[in-house]
Image: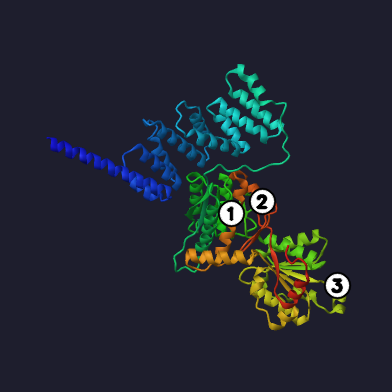
Amino acid sequence: MKKYLVLLVTLLFLTEYASAQSFQEGVELYESEQYEEAIEILQNVNSDEALLFIGKSYLALGNYPLTRSYLDQLQNSERTSIQQEAEYTKAVLYFRTKDYSSSLNTLSQLLDSSNRSGIQIDARRLYNQIIRYLDISEQFEVLQNADSRSLRMDVARQSKRQMDEPLFRSVVNELLRLEPDTSLHDQILESLNLNQISQNSTFSYPTAPEGTVYHIGVVLPTFDEEDPDFTIPRNLYFGIMLAAEEFNSRNSDKKVQLIFKNSAESPDTTAMAVTELAWAHHADAVIGPLFSDTAQRMAELAEEYRVPMLAPLANSDELNLDYNYTFQFNPTFEVHGKNMARYAVQELGLDTLAVITEENSLGRESALAFRKEAERLGAFISYYFEDDFAAIGYDLSEFTEVFTPDEALSDSLGYIPTQAIYAPFTGQASSTMASLLMNDLEAMRSRQIILGSEEWQDADLSAYQRRTFEIFHSQASGTAADSTTVAYFEEDFSTRFNTSPDRFARMGYDTATFLFQSLETAGNPSYLGRVLRNKDVYNGLALQIHFDGHRINQIVNVKPLTPRAQARFEDEPDSED
């Protein structure tokens, strides 16, 4: 009998020793950020400590439902320190899911607890950081849902630092309404000292609490490797990933977490992806998608959920009209036209301009914006031709005859002398129209300056036309970063992904870097839209970005296409607008 007892005690000791070893191994995996491996080990350990670290691991992985599930199991733990650390971790969970009221109520209860476990120091720090982090609407929400008078007073004191007098007095009125003990009203008013309300003339963005995680959705289509478009979303995402890794490496107290969703080239699938990102993942911003039809649906939902949408490639003029949460990094056709008009008038010194555009084309928006901006700047639009050129076989001679250099003929027919022609041709016929326009001008020996759209880069010009004409075109993309930054990116990208970066990789990196820098400034994502609109010029690998108070990137470069244009271009002190 004694022999069996000794064996049983030995087995129990070995089992407990193995469990302790497993727990220690799981904690070490957790501390080295190998959270999935830590969970796998800790799930075999039967202890409250193991449940706590499983919950903390799921929190780090962003699986918030499972985080809550494991932490709730510790509500009645016999160990106060474990129970309170679980409550503190729940407060972090509430903060990350934007339930600021629950987070602050939980922290407040920890601070008021008579059982001191040491977690109160962390709780006090996070409590104060969240109070300072909230925007005005979030302060009102916390005020109405606070479980304690002390929390309501702390929120009110912070509001006093941020609000003007009328708005703060409305906070005070709400505070008094929420206090059932009317005998304390005078004491509350005295504590808040309404006679000393500071009128802050400058706004400062809050600092994000330590441990803040920004949830960034990425909505892009996935293609088979054989699809010619396969590398476009892949490289965009690689660029975004690299920007996220750089953000996380330079910030020890806050991180970004990317959440990828497949838009599958379908507006319905895109809608499901954005909805899941907003509801389940509490996304602070969404990058994507690729195509105009999916972008339209995504913009509608970004507006509905009040989640900023950053479109890296979309350039539709219709997309941004009614959506305050949509930011387009690729300048629209209207912006191209506006910037080309500024360049023509302010840089080239031209004051008599003609416009040729195809009816119902994307370039028409550029043409209209060009005309409006040129006239605003004092230039004269000598001719504005808009027609269905496809219906007449793209024969432009009826329109181009007014550009004859024959002064006698011009006088006799009443033609208006014109210095330059803006021809924002777009679509499949753009190259054909550019060639026909140039052939007509060459045949007449006309020498108007040509101002074109991005498509003019692919125009099939003869050697004579390249040698003789001054041709400029607008261009949204182009490297503005210094050579050291470019070289570092190319090396880092190639090493990380075993492939060379293309234009789309650079655009993904630029879009994400601009977003992450804006989040660093904003602190609280509720201010993100304001920061994006007003951020200084970003000189990127593929884009220069400056919203200049708008929601469309306003920077478009004007580039020379021919040697004669290059010669004039080089003489200009500032070749970009």
Q: Measure the alpha-carbon separation of dots 3 and 1.
A: 50 Å
Instruction: Looking at the image, tell me whether mark 3 or mark 2 is earlier in sequence order.
Output: 3
Secondary structure under the numbered disc 2 in the rendered image = helix
Q: In the shown orientation, is residue 57 left or right of residue 288?
A: left
Label 1, residues with CA under 10 Å away: few <14, some 14-19, many ≥20: many
Q: Which mark is residue 201?
A: none
- Residue beneath disc 2: 533
Question: What x and y, as percent, mark residue 486?
Answer: 60, 65
Question: What x and y, as percent, mark residue 261?
Answer: 48, 54
Nearest the viewer among 72 and 356 is 72
Q: Is residue 66 above or below residue 444?
A: above
Q: Which mark is residue 310?
A: 1
Question: What x and y, as percent, mark residue 530?
Answer: 65, 47
- Residue beneath disc 3: 414
Label 2, residues with CA under 10 Å away: few <14, some 14-19, many ≥20: some
Nearest the viewer among 474 and 13 is 13
Q: Is residue 444 above or below residue 333?
A: below
Image point (53%, 40%), residue name: 98
* Amino acid type assigned to the residue bearing label 1 in the image: Leu
Instruction: Looking at the image, tell me whether mark 1 or mark 2 is earlier in sequence order.
Output: 1
* Amino acid type assigned to the residue bearing label 2 in the image: Arg
